[in-house]
Amino acid sequence: MKRWAAFLFIIFTLCLSMPSYGADIESRLKALEDTIQQQGETIKEQHKIINELREELNNKKPQETAGTVKEEAEKPKAQAASGLFGASALSNPNISLVLDTFVYSSNLTEEELENRSIPGFTTEGLENRKGFSLEAAELFLFAPVDPYFNLYATIPVTEEGVELEEAFFVTTSLPHGLQAKGGKFKSSFGRINSQHPHAWDFADIPLPYRAFMGGEGVIEKGAQVTFFPALPFYTLLGAEVLQGENEILFGEDAKSGPHAYTFFAKASFDLTDDSTILFGPSVMTGKTKTGSIEEDTEFEGDSRLYGFELTYKWKPSRGRNFTVQSEYLYRTQEGDLSAFDENGDALLDEDGEAVVDTLKRAQDGAYIQAVYGWDRWRLGARYDVLDLFKDEYQLSGEEQDFDGKPWRGTGMLEFHPTEFSRIKLQYNHDKSARNEETNHEWWLQFIMGIGAHAAHPF
């Protein structure tokens, strides 16, 4: 009897539990069905994003490059890029801000720095001021306009105000390896000129650039056409038509309309799996009218600047790299050099004629620099010199003599807390003024960037 009572009790308990057990299964099934539905919606959304990206990608024509030169600076891969907040770059442009600030010291006074020219080359002095300085807070914007154009703008903000340094478009769909650029941009002459100052390995521009083009290089309004031939290694051929407003090399009053032209070729190939070499010639020519050659004078004539660049890069691992970079520049000028008095009036000779001498210059310069990087540190050295092989300065057929060769030696130590910040300590032993006085310069530079920025040149 007791056994039957126990059996009936078990049957009764199971009967009571069956409804709850069934309800538990139903809730689990419903939860699984909801999850599958959500996953299906997520997959549909992801397929939609993939199709949009494919459509955007197909509307672009990526440039053909070789070796490690796939990060060409002025042609970032924008077809699949996204904006700052994840939306399409077509409606949400990439924006970045780079702060370049430093502490500067020199054994010379600020007046001596301002008047520290390079005799025989330029009357422009140094603009550095002792103590804390702000080079610029550089605003950079980039976005595709449509399937045919990309748009770029670089807007430095300084203590003097806001400047439009660059604003140009680049085509993305021209056939046969062609690409066009138009607006205001940094010329592709040479190696350093096309780079922004925050991308330089050193805090200041090399001496040959300062002597032949000025402290900021050549930034002009104009047009550029480049051609990527179908070769087994990276090759770029280009030509530019420029307004010619650079105050040292050309001058805006030299001629009405565009009066400067640039031609360049760049090639690169891998020597080994870890090393790459990049090289190429450039030439820039045009009409010139400038007062930067000698005090109280004005030169009017023709100028031509030749250049050759050579860069070697070795990167065996992510934490180690070594770069050797060099450029040789050679300038020729022929024309008339007019003299003026302190009031800006033309000087007259005994016959009442304006004092005008014929000027013929053929001068050269070069720099070589090496930078070794390991982990977060970089160590670099640079040597730059003028009058290396050629030193010709003739006034009315008579050779003018200048004392010594302008030269400078530089050492640099840099620390990268992250990929977005750099702290640089640099020393210059500057003998460029052709006198006995050495300019001992020190920089403690801080460069920091935020936002989406296009890749720098290889």
Image (cartoon, rainbow, N blue to C red):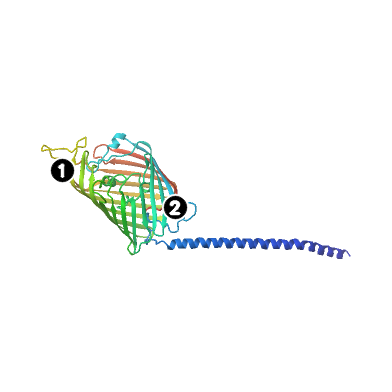
Q: Amino acid at mark 2?
A: Pro
Q: Position of residue 90 (x, y in %)?
A: 45, 55
The residue that disc 1 covers is 357
Q: Position of residue 385 (x, y in %)?
A: 26, 46
Farthest-out residue, right: 1
Q: Is residue 113 left or right of residue 302?
A: right
Q: Earlier in the sequence, mark 2 or mark 1?
A: 2
Q: Secondary structure at mark 1?
A: strand
The foreground one among 146 and 114 is 146
Using a 10 Å C-alpha cutoff, classify the residue at mark 1 as few (fewer than 14 neighbours), some (14 to 19) or many (20 or more): some
Relative to 380, is 16 above or below?
A: below
- C-alpha separation, residue under disc 2 versus residue under disc 1: 54 Å
Q: Is residue 244 left or right of residue 35?
A: left
Farthest-out residue, left: 351
Relative to 266, is 124 above or below?
A: above
The foreground one among 275 and 195 is 195
Q: Secondary structure at mark 2?
A: loop
Q: Is residue 402 left or right of residue 158?
A: left
Name the mark on residue 93.
2
